[in-house]
Image: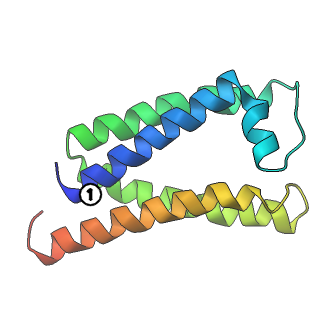
Amino acid sequence: MTPAARSVQVFGWYIVVLGLTLLVVPNTLLVLFRFEPTVEPWIRVVGTLLLPLAAIYLVAARHEATAIFRVTVWNRCWILVAFTAFWLLEIAKPELILFALVDVAGAAWTWSALRRRADSGVQ
């Protein structure tokens, strides 16, 4: 497995854990990040949506889907932009940005691995 694939695989497993947590015990995570506990279904909906996304990451990693790796870099950076906007617009607490920082760190890892691969002449 290439370093880029490994980075996407690790991020895929992170999304599995996050998705299952939001689906099964969302308030545990919410309270940990200083959000109010909720009985609304939306947090579980997010967890439900994350699980198929995680599957895409894991399958892409297994099949060395470089085009998908590139898209994930931009998508994960977008999360930081969106979550920062939510905070600036006072839609969400700044703690939400902590989740985006994990995304950006993963994106940086994947981007760096892709750059090293391109620099070595491997397609």
Secondary structure type for disc 1: helix
**Residue 85, above or below 26:** below
Decide which of 66, 26 is in the foreground and name it: 26
Displayed quadrant of residue 117: bottom left
Question: With 92 as the anchor, is 17 left or right in this view?
Answer: left
The residue under the point 35% across, 59% down is 70
* Residue 4 in the image, given as x and y percentages of width and height: 26, 57
User: Could you tell me which residue is drawn at 23 percent across and 58 percent down?
Assistant: 3
The front one of 106 and 67 is: 106
Report the quarter where the C terminus lies: bottom left
Please tell me whether residue 100 is drawn above or below residue 68 in the rendered image: below
Mark 1 residue crowding within 10 angstroms, few (<14) / some (14–19) / many (20+): many
Residue 122 percent across, percent down from the top left: 9, 66
Looking at the image, which is closer to me, 39 or 52?
39
Residue drawn at (85%, 69%) of the image: 88
Residue 5: horizontal and vertical position, in percent?
26, 50
Image x and y of residue 51, in percent: 52, 29
Q: Residue furthest bottom?
A: 119
Query: Count the marks: how many?
Result: 1
The colour scheme applied to this rendered structure is rainbow
Q: Name, please, the residue furthest toward the left.
A: 121
The image shows residue 38, relative to residue 7, as above or below, that is: above
Q: For residue 111, which quarter of the picture?
A: bottom left
On the rendered structure, is 19 left or right of 4? right
Decide if residue 99 is on the left or right side of residue 110. right
**Residue type of the residue flagged with mark 1:** Ala
The residue singled out by tag 1 in the image is 4
Residue 72 position by quadrant: bottom left
**Front one among 107 and 24:** 24
